[in-house]
Image (tube, grey):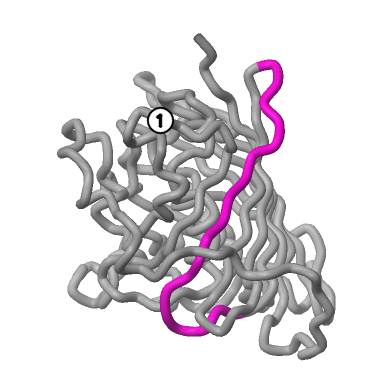
Amino acid sequence: MPEAATAAAERTSTAFVTAPTDDSAYEFEFDRDTALTRRAPGVYDIDLSAGWTIISAVNGGYLLAVLGRALADALPHRDPFTVSAHYLTASQPGPAVVRTDIVRTGRTLSTGQASLFQYDENGAEVERIRVLASYGDLDALPDDVRTTAKPPAIPPMDQCFGPEDGPAPVDGSSAIADRLMLKLDPSTLGWALGQPSGKGEMRAWFGLKDGRDPDPLSLLLAVDALPPTAFEIGLRGWVPTVELTVHVRCRPAPGPLRVSITTRNLAGGFLEEDAEVWDSADRLVAQSRQLARVRLG
């Protein structure tokens, strides 16, 4: 194993990864609920929180942040640059184990893979999600930016609407919404009034409700935290992610994020969602594309 990889594997546990026995050690819920306990080099235990579920399944962005935190500990670089995940089976709240492998280490980038496992009724391991990711140092990137991308046009936050502005949800269906500061652009809310636009667009202000500022790991949550664009196409129900790739472009500035998600093509029961995340300094801080399954009829 290369020296850099050995050093990463042998690092002593830190609060960044390892869950202390006292939950009060965490100021913010996201940090508490993504913290893992290192069992052995590259092997981590976690109790997936029910607070990040939609209906009964754990949100894919939260899962990505969990694996992202494990890889930040296992690799010699700390910041996710690109993360590609395949969701194999639906994750449930409760015990899980994450196993990581170092694929390659270099001076500016290191690459690793990680899988999250849970247990079936017979105690056998079931793989839930598998990730391949490259990490680096976002602070070392040059400042040169040449782009035609523009921040999404979203009305001021006080003119947008959140889950608290709608009818009471079905019990157990929106635990994740209680942890998010989510204010949706009214022009993408036709589905909530029974009048979907058919455009496949979703835009919102995004943050964590307890005031935690965004960082590279929370960007992995942000790209998968809005209502599905399928709702604005006129479809309802669960839209499970099959594959999700996230590119983190720079470290976000403090303050709320703006998230824009679009779908251009639904065919064969699958759709793509392209997301952009912009920070309070008008910088494109993350992009993603995912393939999701929809139920027709």
Which region is colored magenta?
A: 251-268
Left/right placement of residue 222 relative to residue 267 reads left
Residue 197 in sight: yes
87 vs 24: above or below: above
**Any magenta on residue 55?**
no
The residue sitting at 66% across, 78% down in the picture is 250
Q: Residue at x 70, y 68 (%)?
A: 81
Q: Is residue 131 above or below residue 92?
A: below
Going by the numbered disc 1, the residue's amino acid type is Gln
- In-image side of 286 versus 217 (left or right): right
Question: Residue 89 in the image: x percent, y percent?
Answer: 52, 28
Q: Is residue 264 magenta?
A: yes
Residue corresponding to mark 1: 195
In the displayed structure, does residue 41 sit left or right of residue 76?
left
Query: Few, some or many C-alpha atoms within 10 Å of disc 1 (few <14, some 14-19, many ≥20)?
Result: few
Q: Tell me where residue 67 appears, x and y as whole percent.
A: 54, 55
Residue at 38% across / 19% down in the picture?
122
Q: Is residue 86 above or below residue 19?
A: above
The x, y position of residue 246, in whole percent, is 66, 56
Residue 72 x %, y %: 59, 69
Q: Is residue 8 visible?
A: no
